[in-house]
Amino acid sequence: MSLSTIATLGFWQRTIFQKQVADAQRYRADINSMTAASEALFFSDYKFDALIEGLRAGEKWTNIKQSLGENHLSNETEYRIAASLQQAVYGVKEYNHLEGHGDVVWSVTFQPQGNLIASASVDKTIKLWTHDGKLEKTLKGHTDSVSRISFSSDGKYLASASHDRTVKIWNLQQTKIKPLNLKSHRDEVTAVSFSPDSKILASGSQDKTIKIWNKTGTLLRTIKTKAVVNSVSFSPDGQVIAAANANGTVKLWNLKGRLLATLKHRNDNNNYAVYSVNFSPDGRSIATGGGDRTVKIWRFSRNRVTLETKLVGHKQEVLSANFSPDGQIIASSSADNTIKIWNRDGSMLKTFAGHGDKVTQVSFSPNGQTLASASYDKTIKLWSLKNSSLNILRGHQHRVLGVTFNEDGNMLASASQDNTIKLWSPTGKLLKTLQGHTDRVASVNFSPDGEILASGSYDNTVRLWYLNYPEKIWNSGLLDYSRYWQPRGGVGEWGSGGATHTDYGTDIRIGKRVGDWGSRGVGEIGCFVKIGNFCLVPFSKIITLFPHKITLLPQFNFSTNQYFEEGNYSNLTNIPPVGTLHATSLQVEFLTRLQCCSKDIRNICLDWNWNINYHSAYPISKNINLIGHSDSVMSVSFSPNNQIIASASKDKTVKLWNRKGKLLKTLVGHKKWVNSVSFSPDGKMLASASDDGTVKLWSMDGELLRTIPAHDNWVLGVSFSPDGQAIATASYDNMVKLWSVDGELLKTFLKGSSDSVTSVSFSPDGQVIASSSYDGKVKLWGLNDGNLLKTLSGHGDSVMSVSFSPDGKLLASGSRDNTIILWNLALDNLLEKGCSWVSDYLHTNPNVSDSDRQLCQVFKSQN
């Protein structure tokens, strides 16, 4: 190849590379703009639109990664998208909005069977929608606004009230629906309701009357009310009609037209209109909503009504108030454009914002999991009442001061002011509570091999918790043989009887003893790989432990469930029920009987020469106490090689311990409390942060390598970057700083917290720093440009600690509000959740653009 050809190729390669870099920068700018738009929509209470915009950003990022590859792309951008989507996915409650009416939507209600949603509008029409938002049918016939609608209990009929002074009954079973017209009112009809048995219906009007009709349209009775009627509702037994009136009263009538009770929505002389009245499902309570901006819950018993609770929170008139099907919560809608969800005791649970104008009515689905709302903005919105909020871990009785993941990411530990440590699964399930400290636990850290958890406490001690120490839970006492089993089958311990008791452990994964507490031992151990209900078969081989040796038994016949070795013959039964025989041996000095005492191997029974030992296959946590500090231990950290634990204390020292608890060295140099310690990834350095404003770097020999004057105030947190080239610090001065290991200030994150920063944690790829603060926020920072990527809000008090999971897909934060939040940062998972949430909207809404309609299909095809 000629030099000119090589030069030309080099030129084109540089050109292509420069174009890819320029494209990546342009795409990042576009995505940053989209995530900023999503943020703005979210905080303007358009959370559904924020989710759609976040999904657009996620789709664009996925396409860019496919076309450009990941070499020119920064994971900062992915974290920015993920954090924005996380906020939208877990913050949104609206999952669909139904568009089709040409004017204000006055009323919305669910068919009792849950198959249809009906809406009524100023545009003179009624629309029927399927539960996923598809427009099924439009009913035309009224000549003026349709103000209210009501389904019969069997869902076959729909009654409508209109400003054209008529009530219509629509038979939904007809192919061509022709309504039955009920005419008698002399003014606009504003209310209508079927009785629970659907045999009669009541209508209310501006002509100040209530009329009772049968289903065939015959007028049965007219009740004169002396006030405009805004709403009518039947009691569950069908014997009482409640009417909400424009003069500020609610009147209760029996079916014969006798007035049973009158209640005033307000006790003063301000006769604000009452717009809504509804009975609770048990008929014992009545909810009213009125012009005084309140919802009131009334106790109804024996035709007597007393005020039970007043719900205060809306900023404008309450236009609708309704009980959930179980009667436990109340939903209200208001002219302030919001919906509020309340407990019966008056406490507000949630506020739903998203409508662009007054919310005229709310209605619960029959199963109580969905709320429909109608609005002046011409739309119906569907809201999920199921809990899809943040993954908040509750269990501690006091402040959570520290959180950390183990190396595998399958366990989270939390330290608390309630003196306990809790172990959690990544999904938030509480696995275990560790007790032993006598004062608040300030810090926790796993050994890289996951075998030990170190904790530091205000009781001045460090504790080492051996997480895989097995538990013997019962022994018959006939002989002193014993068997201990690890859940993963790694290490087994056993003992022999007679005058000399021997106890030792063998790691059957490597075929070596790992502990020896005596001179001899006879026994067998297993439980390595679970097959069905049986747990003695590793990689198609049976392991038997003979005296002081391990023998693999490869000749296993799965068809006959038998294996052979040196004349020994044993049977293995095929997945037997609980408590039946699993394996036998012809040699009495070895295993005679093994039984599985539960189908999921939680407990194992061993019968050894008629000595029965009953064991848990799940371990307990043995712990040892490391005493040496003279004041509170604020931080603990394991070295990467699992061998050394560093502890930082208010006694101004750092101590180094081995994993057996022996004190190796005390590092003296700080002038005030030492708040945090962190090992470098190569294990050659230790960083310590102090109230004296400095970070000190130490060798493993205890030599002080460098002092960094990091902050003008207390340094509360320190952490090495994954490549070991940088150190992040958190300070009481509200700042996060990034330093080289040579002490050079690399970056100050300027848009910092509004309060002290308590801890810092690097993402596994080293491109993002998470910080926690006294202001109750968690912040994500990009290391490339130092920009704030996202602020995560959810805690109700100061956040004391943050920790990334090893794969970077979860971020844990612990707070003074006694909780831990697990923040989902897995972009693929968030895209999947977001697409699932908006799928009905994308498929059924007529105003969705073609590109948006393909939004999630594009994502699915790329995964």
Image (spheres, grey):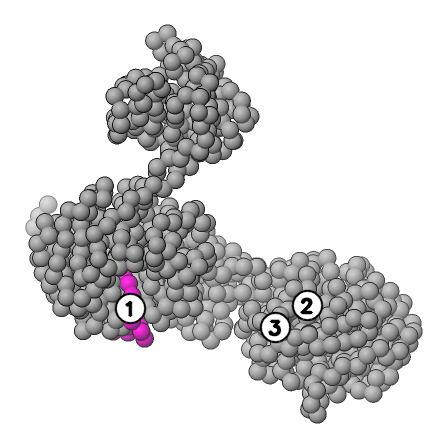
* Residue lying at 21% horizontally and 55% vertically, measured from the top left: 629
Please report whichever mark, 3 or 2, sits nearer to the chain's N-terminal start: 2
Q: Is residue 552 among what the camera can see?
A: no
- Whether pointer 3 and pointer 1 mark residues with C-beta atoms closer than 8 Å, the reply is no
State yes or no: residue 655 in magenta. Answer: no
Relative vertical location of residue 132 with respect to residue 210 in this rendering, above or below: above
Upstream in the sequence, badge 3 or badge 1?
3
x, y percent for residue 789: 32, 67
Local SS, label 2: strand
Amino acid type, callout 1: Val
User: For the point 73% across and 64% down, which residue is it?
Assistant: 281
| Distance between mark 1 and mark 2 Cα atoms | 44 Å
Mark 1 lies on a secondary structure that is: strand
Q: In the picture, residue 565 is in which quadrant?
A: top left
> Of the residues shown, which amino acid type is indicated by label 2?
Phe
Q: Residue at x 34, y 57 (%)?
A: 439
Which residues make up the magenta segment? 745-761
Tell me if residue 492 can be seen. yes
Which numbered tag is attached to residue 346?
3
Alpha carbons under labels 3 and 1: distance apart: 36 Å
Above-or-below relation of 17 to 283: above
Which residue in the structure is indicated by mark 2?
A: 323
Which one is in front in this view, the residue at disc 1 or the one at disc 2? 1
**Residue 757: mark in rendering:** 1
